[in-house]
Image (cartoon, coloured by chain):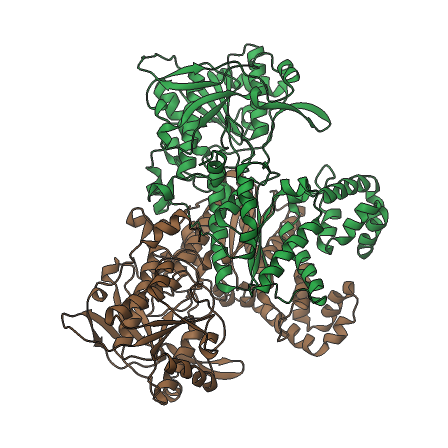
Chain colours: A brown, B green
Amino acid sequence: MTKSALQVARAAYKPKMPKALHGTVKIEEGAATQSVADQEAVEKLFPHTYGMPIVKFVETTDKIDYPTANVGVILSGGQAPGGHNVIAGIFDGMKSLNKDNKVYGFLMGPGGLIDHKYQELTADIIDEYRNTGGFDIIGSGRTKLETTEQFDKGLEILKKLNIKALVIIGGDDSNTNACVLAEYYKAINAGVQVIGCPKTIDGDLKNEMIEASFGFDTACKVYSEVIGNIQRDCNSARKYWHFIKLMGRSASHIALECALQVQPNFCIISEEVEAKEQSLDDIVNEIATAVAKRAAKGDNFGTVLIPEGLIEFVPAIKALISELNDYLAHHQDEFDAIAKDQQRQYIISKLSADNSAVYASLPEGVARQLTLDRDPHGNVQVSLIETEKLLAEMVGNRLAEWKKAGKYAGKFSPQVHFFGYEGRCAGPSNYDADYCYSLGYTASALIAAGKTGYMSSVRNTTAPADQWIAGGVPVTMMMNMERRHGEMKPVIQKALVKLDGAPFKFFASNRENWAINTEYVYPGPIQYFGPTEVCDQTTITLRLEQGK
Amino acid sequence: MTKSALQVARAAYKPKMPKALHGTVKIEEGAATQSVADQEAVEKLFPHTYGMPIVKFVETTDKIDYPTANVGVILSGGQAPGGHNVIAGIFDGMKSLNKDNKVYGFLMGPGGLIDHKYQELTADIIDEYRNTGGFDIIGSGRTKLETTEQFDKGLEILKKLNIKALVIIGGDDSNTNACVLAEYYKAINAGVQVIGCPKTIDGDLKNEMIEASFGFDTACKVYSEVIGNIQRDCNSARKYWHFIKLMGRSASHIALECALQVQPNFCIISEEVEAKEQSLDDIVNEIATAVAKRAAKGDNFGTVLIPEGLIEFVPAIKALISELNDYLAHHQDEFDAIAKDQQRQYIISKLSADNSAVYASLPEGVARQLTLDRDPHGNVQVSLIETEKLLAEMVGNRLAEWKKAGKYAGKFSPQVHFFGYEGRCAGPSNYDADYCYSLGYTASALIAAGKTGYMSSVRNTTAPADQWIAGGVPVTMMMNMERRHGEMKPVIQKALVKLDGAPFKFFASNRENWAINTEYVYPGPIQYFGPTEVCDQTTITLRLEQGK
């Protein structure tokens, strides 16, 4: 296998860890916990794993003998930089407990557990993947572990491989399901612990005890690198407005972090759009106003960051999509019989007045997309809507109107970009390499301590790594009840951007300046070998959240 | 101005230089030269700058006093990483000759010379831009310096600022024009030397004496970083085919270099398409065949690299576009009067049989684009054609046919990307930082030696920098006569990918393996501070060309 020079050099990196994890650890237990909301309902659903204490690991000089315990590992959902290091941390942690411990990886996500597809992860394999991006060591998948039938099927192979604990590396949904599984295995006395690890580049799995989901740091740095490069180009060529969409499902953490890093001329935060009940037209006006103000200074160029989930946060579009889904579900044949060039008019005539007006205001391509591309459940595939093109086109139209009215005299040439796959599997930054390895190592300590229904937690990560705090948080503590597919379900509360949080407030207090002036920052590529202020800093979001 | 930690750290980098340039230099002149072709015609056009010797700088202990000489600098054309370092090299070089020398930058490209827009570049300004990407220090532009009227207008301001030499940093066309200007100023005894520097990320300005155009190294590394990340994602998710278009005007050097760096499943080289007279259909078949072969192994994922200029190298499309341009130039009103949904049929009925068939085979969106988006001269804007979408769609259609015919049973989900602006203004790699600084410093030595009509040349750059060879090459030596806009013009021969060159041959001998197996390499981000094998290597293209 051919390797790049960096792949070779980076393989030798030793991730930094909390001081406590370097030797033998002992566990310190805190007080009993309760869920963030709906305590009664959550407790009822998790009688065996509710109310457990937060735990913390501290150094000890005690010598402890651990019996052998095999561990299974699952990567669940979308890729995030550092997943391989979580597994390396688990491996090294389990081997340090007892050299006979084995680690098994279930292949292609939770499905591997159900279908009994697995591979033993030996030292050779682990070494091949240390400090690398991607989830290719065992693959990932989106099968949901939800039914007792699946749990029982999984238990068969866990028993067969003598696996005492399962670590599920995933986002909020996967960790919720990990806890359901932990509860079930405890209820039936299966003898298998379940530990979760917080993963997602989206950054929406975080709370008081979980500072960050891994991968967010690296992904944002990669996006900020290329956005910074585009901004330098923008500032050199002085002739394009770049509309840049950024991955990140619903929350706008990625867009916000990138904005903090690069100081663009404009950044949309979906959570603010929703809170202010803005229409697409309001957003277009705001951007067009910034374009016009810059044009008045002779600056016919700029950058706009757009969070992927935007469309669903615009109340008017949300309402339109909902009615469209509903209408077409009952009139698909009628719609299909309409001549192509009449379809738009047909839809306009059928929708309620408000939605009809919104639909009529959309550019033709997007209007068509809303009626054509539907997922297997008959829903519009919102993620396929090229919001970056939509906004660029609508802003262009608005400026053309203003030009006619004599309110604007600039030039407007847009370029569009979408970044997502560029960052999900990047090689982890030092922060993510260290954080992930520590999360994995901590998971092994939780296993040794006999815990189940816990998420691995590493905190104080804006300090140097030896001051990081390793421990575990009961997953039930992060839960509340939410309506999902028409049913109340216990789920980990998703963390959206808080409009009263320090990161958003910092952005909001600077954006006027960034909009009109050219205050671009150029973060450059992730560095692994240089000065610590270049290589070891985590996100600005986390630093602001922690008041640093 | 807010700066990232890397911006601050990188500012302190001292570019490495050829050993000869560290102290006082003396010039060594070689034998007289001649142009690569059309010697008589070129000599006739450049009586004062034809046939000059190649020169080389070597160390000397002689102490030489240089009179003061101010220098003007112009950035011409598209951005390329390292432009600021060329200027820093000129500045440091001129100051080392005589501390009273001044450097002036003409603003926003060659237009600044004609319009007398300039700025003195002081030490403070230069220091602000050392080792940074972009051309924002003085801006760039695409005005062509071609007429004696422009030359005379420029001379006014050169005289006023007491400028003895002008350095034009640009691509093949800009360097050609620099030589025309040098010839003119020499002919009229204007007392202004003109020196060129080889710039372009496209990599198509190179020959025996000019190993590389600056920026190619950095841009390819940035593209390879993100393509590598996508490949890791591709190999982890195992469900997408990524079609990735790469900037690079006509030549495929960027696509080829990226292919050498990342080992994708497929890479199209335009020069090969032309040589083999391939149709779009042939290309689609080749890609679909690779997709089908991988699918047969259970691998429904992969990567395809596409050079930006491809479309113009497909003989059938070239012919179609040419007839379309011609036909619509004479029938635009007739065409506009046709109902939108009849236009495609109209065009099919009007073109010659061959072109009509090609047009009919194109997906609707592209067919429409070919008739709608026209530049001010009435030509199709080929660069706007989203080749990556076109190919993804056509491959999908072909696979659907094969599926019906029972010849293919895989899944095909494409994702498309286009990378260009992400790399043009990236911070220069160590190679480009060193190379550019050396080119600029060498330009100052050429000025000191009284040369004009030369291009700054730094060679042997696959060796450590102190072994690099600094010198100058007469621009006329690289010229031949080519037909441009219906007229024979002296131009620097553009370097396309040579199908018998080592880089292409290496690619060709490996691509079968890369197509079917998953041999991805992950170059990762450009590193500035690590081991030399990670930080200081230049392109694989150059290493293969030099047999290293």
Depicted A362 relative to depicted B46: above or below: below
Q: Residue at x 67, y 53 (%)?
A: B284
In this image, B77 relative to B84: left or right?
A: right
Q: Residue at x 40, y 67 (%)?
A: A199
Depicted A291 relative to depicted B467: above or below: below
Q: Residue furthest top?
A: B189
Depicted B35 relative to depicted A159: above or below: above
Along the viewing direction, whichever of A386 and A142 lies nearer the viewer = A142
Q: Position of residue A460 (x, y in %)?
A: 27, 63
Residue B423 visible in this rendered orientation of the protein: yes
Along the viewing direction, whichever of A306 and B28 lies nearer the viewer = B28
Along the viewing direction, whichever of A102 and B155 lies nearer the viewer = A102
Q: Position of residue A353 (x, y in %)?
A: 68, 71
Dividing the image into 4 quarters, which one contains the N terminus of chain B?
Answer: top left
Q: Residue at x 76, y 44 (%)?
A: B320
Q: Position of residue A342 (x, y in %)?
A: 78, 65
Q: Position of residue A170 (x, y in %)?
A: 42, 70
